Amino acid sequence: MTPNLPGDLLLFLALGFNTVAGIAYLLSARGRQSFQGLAQNAYNVFTVLVGLAVFYLFYLFFSHNYAIKYVYEYSERAQPFFYILSAFWGGQEGTYLLWLFFNALFGYIIIKRGGQYRDYAMAVFALVNFFFLAILVKLSPFALLPVAAPDGMGLNPLLRDPWMVIHPPVMFLGYAMAAIPFVIAMAALLLNDYTSWLRRAFPWVIITTLMLAAGNILGGFWAYKTLGWGGFWAWDPVENSSFIPWVIALALTHGLIIERRSGALRKINLMLTSFIFLLVVYGTFLTRSGVLADFSVHSFTDLGINNLLIAFMVVSLLFTIVMLAVRWRAVPTAPLHYNYYGREFIL
C-alpha cells in the first residue's frame, strides 16, 4: 500500500461524514429532532478522522517518508525536532489541515454552548468545513512524488526560527475561532431570535481578538528578527489580512459591550461579526491565490485552488448579505444615546 492512501482515505471519509452531519443538523433545526443523534455521531466521526489525518501527517514527517511530496518539500533528515514540527504548517496543504483540525475541535463549543442556535450554527459550520475539505481533497498533503527521494529539500531558511514554530498555530487558532461567532450570528438571523446571541457569541469574539493580536505580535517579532524590516511593523500586503480583522474585532468588542449595556448597535454588531470571518476568508484568498506573489514575502504561489477559494468567498459573502438584507428590519435594537460625557459615546 502506498503511503498516500491512508491520508487521502481519511480526508475523503471526513468529507462524507461532515456532509452527513451538516444535513442532519439542518434537518434537526427544521424540526426533525430524530436527526440529532445522527448529526452528533457523524460530527464525532468527522472530528476523529481529521485528527487521525493530522496524526498521520506528523508520522510521515517524523518517519522521514520522502515519497510524500509535502514531506519532501518542507523537511530533511538533519532538521531539528521543532523545525520538523513546524514543517507541518510550512506550506499550504498543512496549514489548511491545521485550520480544519482547529475548526473540528471548536465545533464542540457550538454543540455545548450554542443553546437554541446550535443546530443552525452547526449546519452553517459544516458548510465552512466543506470548503476546507474540498481544498484538501484537491490539494492533498498526502500526494506522492513521482519517485521517492532519499532526503528532503528542508524548510525554507526564513522559517527556521523559534517564532515560526508558534506564530502560525496561534494565528490559525484566531482564524478558526472567528467562525464561531459568525455561525452563531447566522443562526440567530436564520431563527430571527436574538434573545441570547450576544451571550453565546461574546466570549468567542474576545478570544478571537486576543488570538489575532497574539498572532500579529509574534509575526512582528519574526519579521523584525528574520527579515530585517527595522521595526516591529512594516507594511506588507499580507500583514493586513490578519491586522484588519483584528481591528474589526476590536470595534465589535466595544459594540457588544454597548449592546450588553443598553441593547443598542445590535444590527451593526451582527454585521461586524460577519465581517471578521469574511475578511479572514478574503485574506486567505490574497495570501494563497498567488495574486500578491510579486509584492509580499508571505504570499504563496497559485497551486490550482483559486476557483475553490473564490467560491468560498462568494458563497460566504452572498449568504451573509442575503441574511442581513432579509432580517435587517426585523432585528430589534435600542437607540444609541449620544451623551458626549457618557460611557457609550466614549466606547
Image (cartoon, rainbow, N blue to C red):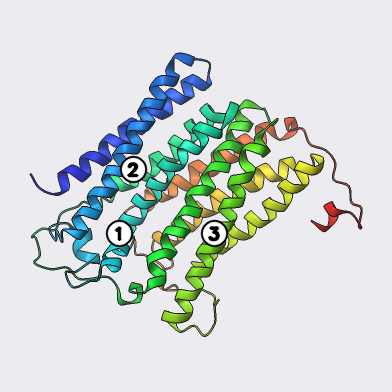
Tell me the quarter of the image containing the N terminus.
top left
Mark 2 residue element: helix
SS class, disc 1: loop
Q: How many marks?
A: 3
Look at the image and tell me in which quarter the C terminus lies. bottom right
Q: Height in image: 82 above or below 30?
A: below
**Residue 9's quadrant in the figure?**
top left
Judging depth in this view, the residue of 28 and 166 nearest the camera is 166
Instruction: Name the residue that disc number 3 marks.
Output: 212
Q: Which residue does the image show at 32% across and 64% down from the upper left?
A: 86
Q: Residue 149 location in percent, x, y?
A: 10, 65
Would residue 301 be visible to someone looking at this image? Answer: yes
Q: Secondary structure at mark 3?
A: helix
Q: Position of residue 83 (x, y in %)?
A: 29, 68
Residue 74 location, quadrant: bottom left
Spatial CA span between label 3 and label 2:
25 Å
Q: Amino acid at mark 3?
A: Leu
The Cα–Cα distance between marks 1 and 3, rounded to whole angstroms, is 20 Å
Circle 1 residues within 10 Å: few <14, some 14–19, many ≥20: many
Picture coordinates of residue 111 (x, y %)?
Answer: 49, 32
User: Mark 1 and 2 residues: CB-CB less than 8 Å, in contact?
Assistant: no
Residue that mark 2 sits on: 134
Eye-nearest disc, 1 or 2: 1
* The furthest residue to the front: 81
Amino acid type of the residue tagged 2 in the rendering: Ala
- Residue type at the position of mark 1: Phe
Read off the residue under disc 1.
88
